[in-house]
Image (cartoon, rainbow, N blue to C red):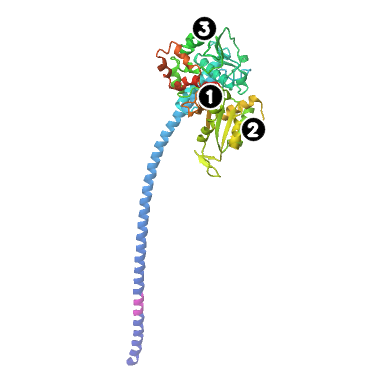
Amino acid sequence: MIDSILPRLSTVTVLLLVIMFTAILYLEHANQRSTERGDILQQELTTASEVINKMRQQLHATKEALVLSETDLILEKGTVEEYKNEIAELNELQEEERSESCSLGGGDSDSGETKCNIDDRWKPSNAQEQLQYNLFARYAELHGKIMDNDPSVEQKYVLFRQETSGLGNTITAFISSFMLALLTDRAIILESHSILSLYDPPPYLKLRESQIKGSYGSKTTFTQVGGFAEMGGGGPKSQWFEWISCADLKETLAEHQTIEVVSNQYYAPLLINNPHYIEFFMKTFGKDVYGPFYRFILNNVKPHLVSKVNAFKEKYYKDNFIVGMHMRREYLNPKRASMFWPCADMLSPTIDNEDGIILNGRLIKKVYWYVATDSSFASEAKRKYGDKIITYADFQSESGDVLRAMDYFLVGDADEIIATSGSTFSDIMFARTGKVPHQVTEVNTCYKNVHNQPCYFFWKGVLDTSCYPNGYDDLFRNPMMINQRNCYTNFQHGADHM
């Protein structure tokens, strides 16, 4: 029985052993796989841990950078805030000064309504312009008080009356008289049909005689018309010429309530080079005196003239290069006139692309030569240069006064200007915009001037005054006078002098 059982047990045992062995093998294999998976997981965990640590380091570094940036930003913000506060305080002080200057008269209103705000048209961009702004703001205040008969100031005036002369002579004589009024603390009064046909008074100044609320009192007439410095009728050695050139005018003219100026000359160089004012002019205005005075008092061009100028410029000036020329017949013979064309040619860029060229950041498609003249020079040039020659008369039919006004504004707005040396009309064209012109001279040359100031034809007369003891050397104690001695030389009439 046992023998019969043993084989069965052996078979069972073998089966059990096989099963156990198989189970052991499976478990070992599973364990090995688990170990391998664990190793893989461990490796992946290690890698992930390293990545996390790197991210932590990066985050930490970023946080430190952010902290530093935030600190810098706070410091920088503080600096900026301080700067902003300083600017705000300065602007507030300037605004108070402007408000005070503009609240005491000024506006061009018969009702006395205040419109004075010179900042609308005069915005300083540097220290020198700020000096000019402060000067003119104080003057606007004083002028308004005088016009309104304010008892806190003396009622003193400079009355400018137009002498029968052209626009160039009249405007430059008026600007000179405005300088005289400012230097002597007087209101300037303008009686000139030529000027008032082009300009309205600025909103911050009453300029008309009818707007005076006080009284002129007695008038002292200062005459400087034609001839060689006929000031007061006494020639270059007259008392007026001596006073304007050499005296402390506020003191010398103290007893004269109203100075009536009848002039057709730009006598401002006498004031600018006066020993009592030369330092003031050089510090406050530098190389351009005429421009700031002009822009302060003659900035309100009649609207209908502005429209005409803009219409012409829209057609010809936009995207084009303009050489503006003023050719004064009285000072030009044919030979001298012929010098304008090669001069204009030298100043004109070459357009070698049908799409135009870029010049100083501007697209330039064509070149035009605007010719302002009282002669046949423009029509003669048209026969030679064709459509390159443009005039306002060809653009639109207007009266003589309007045509002169258009020439005045359009030549001054050109990219380059060629002027007739000796012509006051040329002078006001370039002096208005502050551009330094080229000039065709009495010896048939074309050269670029060194400044943009009008000419005083009788400058040599100062050598007969008491404040030029060193003669010729004293003519240039103000460097702006460098070309004044050439004015008379270039003031030549007709072909007989060429």
Q: Main secondary structure of the magenta part?
A: helix
Q: Residues within 10 Å of mark 2 (few under 14, many from 20)?
A: few
What amino acid is found at the position of numbered circle 1 in the picture? Asp
**CA separation, marks 3 and 1?**
35 Å
Q: What residue is shown with label 2?
A: 394
**CA separation, marks 1 and 2?**
24 Å
**CA separation, marks 3 and 2?**
54 Å
Q: Quadrant of the N terminus?
A: bottom left
Name the residue: 60% across, 32% down.
380
Q: Closer to the camera: disc 1 or disc 2?
A: 2
Secondary structure of the residue carrying tag 3 is: loop
Q: Which residues are magenta?
A: 20-26
Name the residue: 43% across, 20% down.
478
Of mark 3 and mark 1, the one earlier in the sequence is: 3
Q: Closer to the camera: disc 3 or disc 2?
A: 2
What amino acid is found at the position of numbered circle 2 in the picture? Asp
Q: Does the stretch in magenta take in 360?
A: no
Q: What residue is shown with label 1?
A: 427
Q: Residues within 10 Å of mark 1 (few under 14, many from 20)?
A: many
The image position of residue 38, as x and y in percent, is: 35, 66
- Against 419, residue 20 (above or below) is below
Name the residue: 67% across, 30% down.
397
